[in-house]
Image (tube, rainbow, N blue to C red):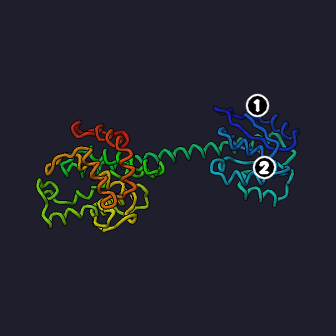
């Protein structure tokens, strides 16, 4: 029987407690495939736990210790091995036995004594299906990644649009994102949550798009009426982003709506206090205030980084989450590095990360 050799060559794990059975399968398969052998279910699982996993398993059912059924159950419960096709090779030919094996997740059944042509044909078919599934999964992963990057870019660009209306360069949202990421990492957030925080932070002030220019760009102090209008921008931002099932957009919504809340409950728009304020918003509040203080605007001069740091420290337990302030102070040297790298005097700087 002719088979098309594949590059790289597939690897098949043969599991049987009888050496003669392994020798027969080895003789049939080695002209076309790499093989590994295990004489017990326990040894088979050890091989499957290694980094280089086989592409298919030919698995005997009746073995001392762990049976083939037991091994199959373990493999199908593990995300790292669940997709690897299992073909039972057994003398058990009852329909109920075959049905049970397929219910456990096996893809096929070969009865002993084996027919070489049948073994090769079944193996070839299942490997082809496995390769197709892997190729499809890779395409799905690539497409999902592309969609995520597109979504991140849209969020970034909308955030930049808001900053341009506020007489600030786009560097503000870069610093904000990097400050947030640094604080999140220092606070022990998972890599996934840090990434969500980093990519959602640019949308924190998107609601300023809805604030009139005469208020947003006023060089002097705002009146009480003007300040009331300015305080609407978190709600406007949340309305622009909207409620979505997408995790990244949920994070952006949360940050936009709550980043002006204060730990003592005196913030806006909801007057939340303490841990009722979402964690991402508490982190963004520190990053946003530090950046705002250290940047010159038409209505104020820039504070020194040290003065801004001291203000953040003094506001722990009032404006800011005291635990997060402690992390901020701990990594202040890193904060300064970010500030200097994306200083506004350098002009607009693009980041490959955003």
Left or right relative to 336: residue 107: right
Residue 31 appears at what percent x and percent y?
76, 31
User: x, y percentage for residue 236?
Assistant: 27, 63
At x 74%, y 56%, the residue is: 102
290 lies left or right of 7: left
- Residue 147 appears in the rendering: no
Where, quadrant-wise, is the N terminus in this rendering?
Answer: top right
**Quarter placement of the C terminus:** top left
Question: Badge 1 is on which residue?
Answer: 31
Q: Is residue 114 left or right of residue 8?
A: right
How many tags in the picture? 2
Q: Residues within 10 Å of mark 1 (few under 14, many from 20)?
A: few
Residue 164 is tagged as: none
Seen from the viewer's position, the closer of residues 124 and 2 is 124
Say whether residue 17 is visible: yes
Q: Earlier in the sequence, mark 2 or mark 1?
A: 1
Q: Which residue carries the number 2 mark?
A: 88
Q: Badge 2: how crowded within 10 Å, few (<14), some, or many (20+)?
A: many
Residue name at image x 14 percent, y 54 percent: 217
Q: Please, what secondary structure does the residue beneath circle 1 have?
A: loop
Q: Is residue 253 above or below residue 348?
A: below
Foreground residue, 68 or 301?
A: 301
Residue 347 sits in quarter:
top left
Location of residue 7 in the rendering, given as x and y in whole percent from the top left corner: 64, 32
Q: State yes or no: discs 2 and 1 in contact (Cβ < 8 Å).
A: no
Q: Of circles 2 and 1, which is in front?
A: 2
**In whole angstroms, how far apart are the C-alphas of marks 2 and 1?**
21 Å
User: How far across and down, in percent of the image, does residue 336 sit?
Assistant: 31, 41
């Amino acid at each position: 029987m002719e088979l098309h050799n594949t590059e790289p060559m597939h690897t098949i794990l043969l599991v049987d407690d009888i050496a003669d059975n392994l020798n027969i399968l080895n003789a049939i398969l080695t002209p076309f495939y790499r093989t590994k052998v295990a004489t017990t279910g326990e040894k088979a699982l050890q091989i499957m736990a290694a980094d280089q996993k086989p592409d298919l398993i030919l698995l005997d059912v009746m073995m001392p210790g762990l049976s083939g059924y037991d091994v199959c159950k373990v493999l199908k419960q593990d995300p790292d091995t669940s997709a690897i096709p299992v073909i039972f090779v057994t003398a058990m030919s009852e329909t109920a036995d075959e049905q049970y094996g397929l219910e456990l997740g096996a893809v096929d059944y070969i009865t002993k004594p084996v027919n070489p042509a049948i073994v090769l044909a079944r193996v070839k078919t299942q490997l082809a299906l496995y390769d197709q599934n892997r190729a499809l999964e890779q395409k799905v992963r690539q497409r999902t990644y592309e969609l995520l990057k597109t979504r991140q870019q849209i969020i970034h660009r909308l955030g930049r649009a808001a900053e341009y209306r506020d007489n600030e360069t786009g560097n503000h949202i870069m610093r904000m994102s990097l400050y947030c990421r640094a604080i999140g990492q220092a606070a022990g957030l998972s890599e996934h949550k840090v990434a969500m925080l980093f990519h959602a932070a640019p949308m924190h002030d998107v609601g300023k798009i809805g604030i009139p220019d005469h208020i947003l760009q006023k060089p002097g102090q705002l009146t009480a009426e003007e300040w009331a209008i300015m305080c609407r921008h978190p709600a406007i931002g949340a309305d622009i982003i909207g409620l979505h099932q997408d995790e990244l957009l949920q994070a952006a919504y949360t940050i936009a709506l709550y980043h002006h809340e204060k730990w003592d409950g005196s913030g806006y728009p909801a007057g939340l206090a303490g841990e009722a304020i979402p964690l991402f918003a508490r982190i963004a509040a520190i990053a946003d205030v530090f950046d705002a203080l250290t940047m010159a605007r038409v209505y104020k001069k820039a504070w020194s980084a040290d003065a801004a740091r001291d203000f953040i420290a003094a506001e722990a337990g009032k404006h800011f989450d005291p635990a997060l302030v402690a992390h901020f102070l701990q990594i202040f040297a890193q904060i300064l590095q970010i500030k200097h790298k994306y200083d506004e005097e350098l002009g607009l700087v693009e980041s490959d990360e955003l």
